[in-house]
Amino acid sequence: MKLGMIVMESPYQHEASDSAIQFAKAALAKGHEILRVFFYQDGVLNSTKLMEPQSDDRHIQKQWTAIGTENNIEFIVCVAAAKRRGINDTVTAEGFTIGGLGMLTELAIEADRLVEFRA
């Protein structure tokens, strides 16, 4: 099954990001394909390479980057939501691309299921 994902929560505010990462790992392990992850609203904060969690805490951006790199998953960061939060190409981590809502529309058309993670 071809899956699309939308992440709408910031990485350390709510469990949505952690749940999305676990969902992605489980779906890939079951043989599903994740076409794209679209980061929207506060979810764009998952893309910043500026986060520096404590050494004994999970590093959510690095977890996303690892999943994307290992599985060739496209990560799109909503441009409007990113600009509102001071995120641009200079602060997004490797594997994250800034894009528009048209890419979310494409994802909704191409995916068999679109799964949303938010509070």
Image (tube, grey):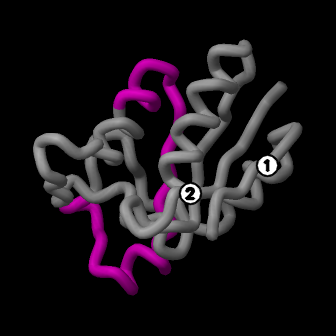
Q: Which is nearer the N-term, disc 2 or disc 1?
A: 2
Q: Determine whether the residue tagged by mark 1 lies in a helix, strand or loop.
A: strand
Q: Is residue 51 left or right of residue 104?
A: left
Other residues around mark 1 within 10 Å, as few (<14) / some (14–19) / many (≥20):
some
Residue depicted at x 56% and y 35%:
22
| Quadrant (top left/top right/bottom left/bottom right) for the N terminus | top right
The amino acid type, in three-letter code, at marker 1 is: Leu
Name the residue furthest front: 56
Left or right of residue 16: residue 93 = left
Q: Position of residue 115 (x, y in %)?
A: 75, 50
Asked whether 75 falls inside the magenta stretch, the response is: yes
Start-end of magenta stretch? 66-91
The kind of residue on which mark 2 rests is Ala
For label 2, count other residues whose C-alpha is less than 10 Å away and answer few (under 14), some (14-19) or many (20+): many
Q: Picture coordinates of residue 81 (x, y %)? A: 47, 78
Q: Is residue 37 shown in magenta?
A: no
Give the residue at mark 2. 16
Q: Position of residue 95 (x, y in %)?
A: 36, 40
> Residue 94's x, y, as percent?
28, 41
User: Which residue, given by chain and number where applicable, does mark 1 sit on?
Assistant: 114
48 above or below 36?
Answer: below
Q: In the drawing, does residue 27 fall left or right of residue 11?
A: right
87 in relation to 116, above or below:
below
